[in-house]
Amino acid sequence: MELIADTTVLIDFWRLGSKRKRIGDLIEKAGGASFVVPWITQAEFSRGTLFKGIELAELESFYSGFLLLALDQKTMDCYCHLWVGMTGKGKGPDYPDLWIAACAVSRGIPALTRNAKHFVQIPGLEVLAYELKE
């Protein structure tokens, strides 16, 4: 099984990976699934780490634990259909989240996120939400 990883998944593994108790719900929801990291998720995460002063070269070994997904025509077409459908109904989806959703919807793979509210209105998207533990 595969899951599309939202940026929150990468953030939580980066910050809390050694604190397994805090990310217990994330690990439980993922089960034995492989994490698929779309290009937009990788870009958001890399941009944030670079902003925090972490060199992109430091992320190479971190990213090696994930399946990285390049932009393809299937995702682009799905994104366009979702955007037109949602914008036409006045739902104005958020740009990065809609790209992440398009990666998931176009492949029939659930999206895993800590911010389910960003994804709930996207048609055809199965969302698995998790919480961080104290």
Image: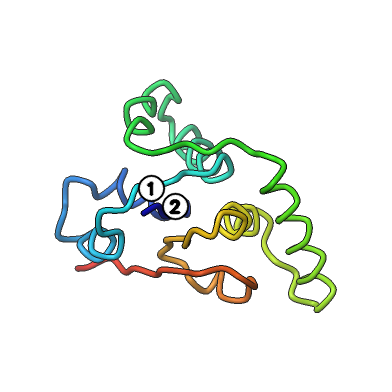
Q: Distance between the residues labelled 2 and 1?
A: 6 Å
Q: Vertically, is 115 above or below 58?
A: below
* Mark 2 or mark 1: whose residue is earlier in sequence: 2
Q: Which amino acid does label 2 sit on?
A: Ala
**Dot 2 surroundings within 10 Å: few (below 14), some, or many (20 or more)?**
many
Q: Which mark is residue 5?
A: 2
Provide the secondary structure element on which disc 2 rests.
Answer: strand
| Percent of width and height locating residue 128 | 41, 68
Residue drawn at point x = 63 percent, y = 56 percent:
102
Q: Vertically, is 86 above or below 77?
A: below
State the residue lying farthest toward the right: 88
Q: Vertically, is 93 above or below 54?
A: below
Residue drawn at point x = 40 percent, y = 29 percent:
54
Q: Vertically, is 127 above or below 95?
A: below
Q: Residue 115 carries which label?
A: none
State the residue lying farthest toward the bottom: 89
Provide the secondary structure element on which disc 1 rests.
Answer: strand
Q: In which quarter of the image is the N terminus?
A: bottom left
| Percent of width and height locating residue 86 | 76, 71
Residue drawn at point x = 40 percent, y = 52 percent:
2
User: Which residue is identified by label 1?
Assistant: 35
Q: Which amino acid does label 1 sit on?
A: Phe
| Percent of width and height locating residue 53 | 43, 30
Q: Is 112 displayed left or right of 85 in the figure?
A: left
**Is label 2 in contact with label 1 (beta carbons under 8 Å)?**
yes
| Percent of width and height locating residue 3 | 42, 55
**Colour scheme of the picture:** rainbow
Q: In which quarter of the image is the C terminus?
A: bottom left
Residue drawn at point x = 69 percent, y = 47 percent:
74
